[in-house]
Image: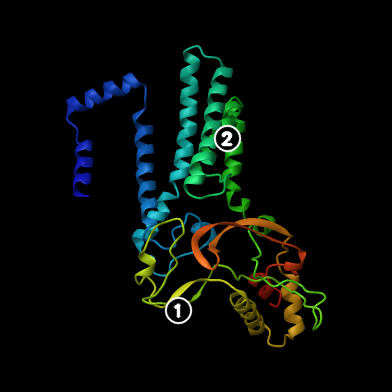
């Protein structure tokens, strides 16, 4: 590490002759130092962030979205995740900057607008295909996983022609996208699209021998963090890393990710307790009715999820499996604690 830092300092303290030589090389190549430097810094932060996934147990790339936070997360881990949230926007911003500069340069050299558009369109499509064909299989992701490279490629494809729109229109569209970002994925429809029903979840059985088995609501019962026997204390090791830290005492309280109806039931009883704390006069029928009326409707569907894979009872590792469910598995929908409690205030 000392050698790396020393080398970096030496790079920043170049002699005048070295600076002049470097500037001549840069001018000859036609590259802009600031863009390359900024992109390089973003790559350094991104590389550091990816490496921390081997010892930061909640590092998965989406913990900021689903609001998962390690209880004992220290400042170093927090900052390493916080600062790298700016990497992808930086790459895309610099890609747009490069498109603008490249287009101007090629126009000055006599190329037509159509040639430039086709050049950008082809490069954008290649980036998307690279993400689908190489990146996704390498990380055991769905074939059409839309990552950062695919996002940059899609932006290049769009701007291969959109770049010719009036600047004011492009600026207005950009501002609207930024301002609306907080609401894009928080609609009820999108939330419902992120919910799946496990195979072990109860189903309605109208013709049960002991009478019809009804289903009122769904509750979280898959990938729930709860007590788990083990020594010296287990903690979930992310499937996307090869870390062994989760088996060496991260979590001496013996907690692990578990699933089952035994995990779903406490969510329902916990919400019922909160409702009764607000209004102790509620009856069982009142609580049931409010939970059902405030539930998030879930439609019959299917989804590819990451789960453990067993063959003949032998654990084979992690992988993508497909789960599907019908209308007999959803009841009134997924319970929503905030809305249920708010309904009795």
Name the residue rendered at 41%, 55% in the picture: 81
Q: Nearer the viewer, residue 345 or 198?
A: 198
On screen, 20 above or below 67?
above
Q: Secondary structure at mark 2?
A: helix
The residue drawn where x is 43% and y is 64% is: 237
Give residue 18's position: percent from left, percent from top. 19, 27
Q: Nearer the viewer, residue 74 or 302?
A: 302
| Other residues around mark 1 within 10 Å, as few (<14) / some (14–19) / many (≥20) | few
Instruction: From the top left corner, tell me how far across and down residue 9 is, in percent.
Output: 21, 41
* Residue appearing at x 36%, y 56% in the figure: 52
Label 2 close to label 1 by CB (< 8 Å): no
- Residue 56 appears in the picture as rendered: yes
Residue linked to disc 2:
171
Count the numbered circles shown: 2
Q: Which residue is mark 1?
A: 229
Q: CA distance from mark 2 to mark 1?
A: 56 Å
Q: Name the secondary structure under disc 1.
A: loop
First in residue order: circle 2 vs circle 1 = 2
């Amino acid at each position: 590490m000392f050698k790396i830092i020393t080398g970096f300092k030496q790079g920043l303290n170049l002699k005048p002759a070295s600076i002049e030589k470097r500037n001549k090389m840069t001018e000859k190549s036609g590259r802009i130092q600031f863009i390359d430097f900024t992109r390089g810094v973003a790559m350094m932060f991104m590389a550091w962030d990816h490496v921390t996934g081997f010892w930061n147990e909640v590092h998965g790339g989406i913990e900021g979205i689903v609001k998962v936070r390690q209880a004992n997360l220290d400042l170093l881990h927090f900052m390493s995740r916080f600062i790298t949230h700016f990497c992808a926007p930086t790459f895309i911003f610099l890609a747009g900057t490069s498109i603008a500069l490249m287009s101007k340069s090629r126009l000055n050299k006599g190329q037509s607008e159509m040639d430039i558009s086709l050049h950008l369109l082809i490069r954008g499509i290649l980036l998307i295909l690279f993400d689908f064909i190489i990146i996704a299989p390498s990380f055991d992701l769905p074939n059409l996983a839309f990552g950062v490279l695919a996002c940059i490629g899609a932006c290049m494809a769009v701007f291969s022609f959109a770049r010719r729109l009036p600047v004011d229109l492009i600026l207005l569209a950009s501002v609207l996208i930024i301002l609306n970002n907080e609401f894009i994925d928080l609609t009820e429809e999108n939330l419902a699209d992120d919910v799946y029903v496990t195979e072990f979840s109860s189903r309605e059985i109208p013709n049960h021998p002991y009478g019809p088995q009804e289903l009122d609501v769904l509750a979280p019962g898959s990938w729930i963090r709860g007590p788990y026997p083990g020594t010296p204390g287990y903690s979930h090791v992310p499937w996307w890393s090869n870390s062994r830290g989760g088996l060496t005492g991260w979590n001496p309280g013996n907690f692990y990710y578990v699933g089952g109806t035994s995990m779903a039931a406490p969510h329902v009883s916990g919400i019922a307790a909160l409702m009764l704390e607000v209004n102790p006069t509620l009856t069982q029928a009142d609580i049931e009715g409010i939970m059902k009326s405030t539930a998030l409707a879930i439609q019959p569907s299917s989804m590819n999820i990451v789960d453990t894979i067993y063959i003949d009872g032998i654990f084979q590792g992690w992988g993508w499996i497909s789960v599907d469910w019908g209308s007999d598995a959803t009841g009134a929908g997924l319970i929503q604690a905030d809305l249920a409690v708010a309904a009795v205030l």
